[in-house]
Structure formats: C-alpha cells, structure tokens
Image (tube, rainbow, N blue to C red):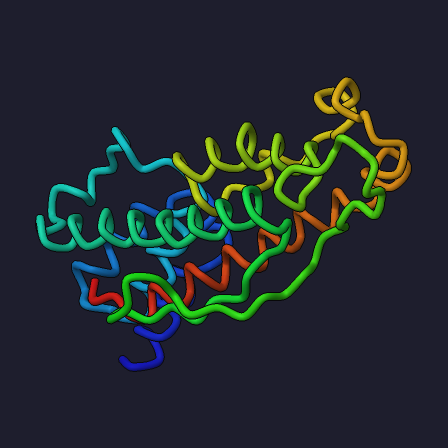
Amino acid sequence: MEIVVQGMCRVLVSEKALGTQPLRVYAIACQHKLAEETRLAAIATLRTPIEDVYVEELEALSAAHYFNLLKFHRRVKAEIYFVLRKASDTDHEFYEYKVEPTRAEPTKEVQSILYRCSDRHSDCRFGGGANWWKYFVQNQVIPAVYHAPLRLELLEYPIGSWTRDKWSCTTCKTIISEQWQHAIDSLRSLFNKIASEVAGQMKF
C-alpha cells in the first residue's frame, strides 16, 4: 500500500499536473494531508492567477486551507515587491534574502548582478540605475507579480520594441540586450528562492 501511495504522490506533483492545474493539486493534497505535496502545489499556484478560478476539488477544501494559500501569496508578493523597490529605486542592485518570519523586513546582503551605467555624464542614471531597468521593473515586472509572482515567462519577449525610444545613453545602448537574459534569469532565481523560503515557514 505504501508503494501505491508513493506512486500516487509522484503523479500528483508531476511537472504536468503542477504546470496545468496547481490549484486542483493543492486542494487534493490538503484534503489527504500530504504536507510536502501541499507545499509544492502552493508554490506552483504562484505561476498563474488564482482569483476567480474554480475547480471541483475546491468544494472539499476548508476555508482555513484556502485562507493560508491566499496568505502565502500575499507574503511572497510582499517580499518580491521589497526586492523590486530596492532594485529599481536605489542602487540598481538585487538583494539576496534570508526571510525571517519574526522580522518586519528580511535581512539582506547586497549582491550586484546587473550592469551599472559607467557614463557619469549620461542622463540615463536614476538613483544609480539605468532608465530602461526602472521602466522594465515598474511597467512589466510589478504588474506581472501582482497576478502571478512566478510567471516571468510572460516577460520574455524582445526588449527593443518597448525600450528603443528610451535608450538615450550610448553606453547602455550597446549592451542592454546582452543584459536582458541575465536580468530575467536572476529575477526568476531570486523569486523562486523567496517563494521556497516563505513556503517553508507557512503552515498550509
């Protein structure tokens, strides 16, 4: 019987199941008190909006379990917004986070991962960061995070079409495209880390 249960658990948290119906997997895992599967499913729900989504299994989900999922989403968004505000409005750097549940703000170590404009006479600098980065964070990343914090694949389209008219700095203009994939990869890695750490502190 134990082998059968283990096999069912593997199917439940398969890449296909979590990728297509994470909310359904979450509801099933909660109903059968599968702690690890519940945690993995909760993280997977961050990849897609869950507002106004209905699956039949939700009818058996307790209000407490659903409330904990919404609380998890709010906490992850709050942590990510904190990262983005620091990255876009201060010194054009990301911060590596260790999320502390008892602190108002997470502890942090500064880790520079993105290009910093070297042209001190350029108008492109904004609080230490280039305008294209601030525009990207405010107009693309933050709206996407609001609906689905881990759905960054929506942001992976050519950068030129919406930033070309903002490339006033000849220094940044020559390397902005090279930094694009690095920025996306760094965001995804950092967001996944935040989600995993917050999920480890939650009781679903």
57 vs 85, left or right, is: left
* Front residue of 190 and 113: 113
Horizontally, residue 177 falls left or right of residue 9, namely: right
Viewer-side residue, 25 vs 73:
73
Residue at x-position 32% and y-position 64% = 39
Instruction: Name the spot of residue 153 as percent of width and height, x first.
Output: 60, 40
Task: Locate residue 173: give its quadrant.
Answer: top right
Residue in the picture at 28% in, 68% down: 103
Quadrant that contains the C terminus: bottom left
Q: Is residue 129 above or below residue 69?
A: above
Residue at image coords 81%, 39%: 176
Of 132 and 73, the residue lying toward us: 132
Q: In which quadrant is the N terminus drawn?
A: bottom left
Above or below, 83 relative to 142:
below
Residue 12 appears at what percent x and percent y? 37, 59
Which quarter of the picture shows residue 5? bottom left
- Percent position of residue 106, x then y: 38, 65
Tell me if residue 12 comes above or below residue 82 in the rendering.
below
Name the residue nearer the viewer: 104 or 77.
104
